[in-house]
Amino acid sequence: MDISFDNTKVAFDYKSDKELKASRFLFTTMNYPWFSAMGVRLTPFLMKTGLPINGIIRSTIFKQFVGGETLERTAAVAKLLNDYHVQVILDYGVEGKEGEANFEQTTEQFIRVINYAATQKNIPFISVKITGLSRFGLLQTLNEAPRLRSGVHDHEVENEEWDNVRERMYRICEVAAERGIGVLVDAEESWIQDPIDRLTMEMMEAFNKDKAIVYNTIQLYRQDRLSFLKLSHQIAQQKGFILGIKLVRGAYMEKERARAQQKGYPSPIQQDKSFTDGDFNAAVEYCINNLNSIAVVIATHNEYSNLHAAELLDMKGIMHSHPHVHFSQLYGMSDNITFNLAKAGYSVSKYVPFGPIREVIPYLMRRAQENSSINGQTSRELTLIKRELKRRKERSKPPSPKGEQGNAQS
C-alpha cells in the first residue's frame, strides 16, 4: 500500500507559501496552552463589547477552520478541495439558539444546505445537530424518562414538542433522500444522547432502505459505544435497513467527567486513551467486516486508525472508493492524512463549517481547546508545516555554479 502521512508535498500542495506561513503562525500561537486558554476566555467577551477584532479573527483562526461566512462563500473552498479529489461535509456552524421560531429557521437552513450540496459534485454529506432543532432541556427530560416505546413520558406539552422535533428531522431527511445527500447527525453530551439515538434510528428505518442517507455518530471515548454499535447493527438487520455510522473518538470529555463527579455517578468515559483507541479501531474493523449492511464514515485525526482502516480495505480487496466507506478530517487540520488518502484513491472529505463569525465562535473555541488538549496535535501540525516550508525553500534555491564544489575542495 503506497501511502505515507509524512508526505508534506501532497499534504500542502493546495496552499501557497503565504497561506502556509499564516498557518505556521496560528499553530505556533496555539502551541502555548496558556495563550489558547486566554483566547478561549477572552474572545467571546471581546466580540460582545463591539471592539473591532473581527478582522483579526477572520484572517487567522476563522480562515484556518471555517469555509466562509455564507453558504455561497464555501464554494471556493469546495472547488479548491475538489481539484485534489477531496470531498466536503458542509456544517451550518450556528449553535445554542432556542425557541420554536429559531428551530424552524435552522430546519430551513439545513434544507437549503442540502439543496445547495446537491448542485455540487463533491459535497456528499451535510452535518446536522439535533440541538439546533430541539430544546436542550427537552432532550435531557427525554433522556431521563422511562424507556417507553414512544420515548416520551406522559406529558402532553412535551409530547407535542417532541413531535415537532421529529417532524423537522423528517423534513430534513426527506429532502436529503430526494437529493441523494447524506445526513450526519452529530453526537452530543451523554445526558441528552439517548433520544437523539432513537430519533436517528427512526429516520434510518424510514430512509436507509436502499441507500445510506442518515448516519448516527458514535463517540468511542464512551465505554458503552462499541456494544451500542453492535446493538444498532442487530436492530438494522432485523428491520431491514442499512446502518449509517460516523465513528469519532469524542468531543466532550472534560465536561462529561466533571458532571459525573459533580452528580456522583460513574463517568461514562473510558479509563484512558488506550481504551478509546482500542474501541475505535475495533469499531472500524466491525464496520468494514459488515460493509454489506453498514455504511461508515471514519472521522478521525489519528494516523494509526486511518492507516489501519486503509490497510484493512486493501487486505480484503475492497476498492478504495467503496460507497460504504468514507474518511473525514476537520477543515484546517490533518491535511497530511486527508490529501494523502485522496491521492491514494480513498473517499475522503473535509468537514467544513460555515456561518457568521459571531455565530461560529463556539466552534472556533472548541478547535482552539482541542488543539491544545490533544497530546501533540498542534506540535504535529506545526512540525509538518515547518518541514514543508523548508522543503519548498530548498527546492527554490538556485543550482550551484559548475566548478564551485571543486573550488571549495582545493
Image: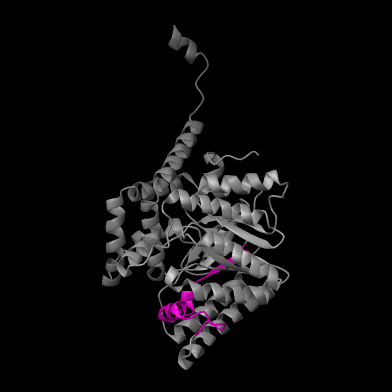
Residue at the image position 60 percent from the left and 66 percent from the top: 231
Q: Is residue 115 magenta?
A: no
Q: Which colour scheme is used?
A: one colour
Residue situated in front as seen by the camera: 357 or 226:
226
> Which range of residues does the magenta coloring cover?
123-152
Residue at the image position 65 percent from the left and 50 percent from the top: 346
Residue 65: which quarter of the image?
A: bottom left
Residue situated in front as seen by the camera: 373 or 365:
373
Residue at the image position 32 percent from the left and 67 percent from the top: 264
Indicate the quadrant containing the N terminus: top left, top right, bottom left or bottom right. top right
Q: Is residue 344 visible to us here?
A: no
| Vertical arrangement, residue 69 with respect to residue 379, above or below | below
Indicate the quadrant containing the C terminus: top left, top right, bottom left or bottom right. top left
| Vertical arrangement, residue 314 with respect to residue 52, above or below | above
Residue at the image position 65 percent from the left and 46 percent from the top: 312
Number of numbered tags placed on the structure image? 0
Residue situated in front as seen by the camera: 366 or 210:
210
Q: Position of residue 290 (x, y in %)?
A: 68, 57
Q: Does the magenta stretch include residue 127?
A: yes
Q: Is residue 379 visible to us here?
A: yes
Residue 268: which quarter of the image?
A: bottom left
| Vertical arrangement, residue 150 with respect to residue 255, above or below | below
Q: Position of residue 349 (x, y in %)?
A: 58, 56
Residue 60: which quarter of the image?
A: bottom left
Q: Position of residue 382 (x, y in %)?
A: 41, 43
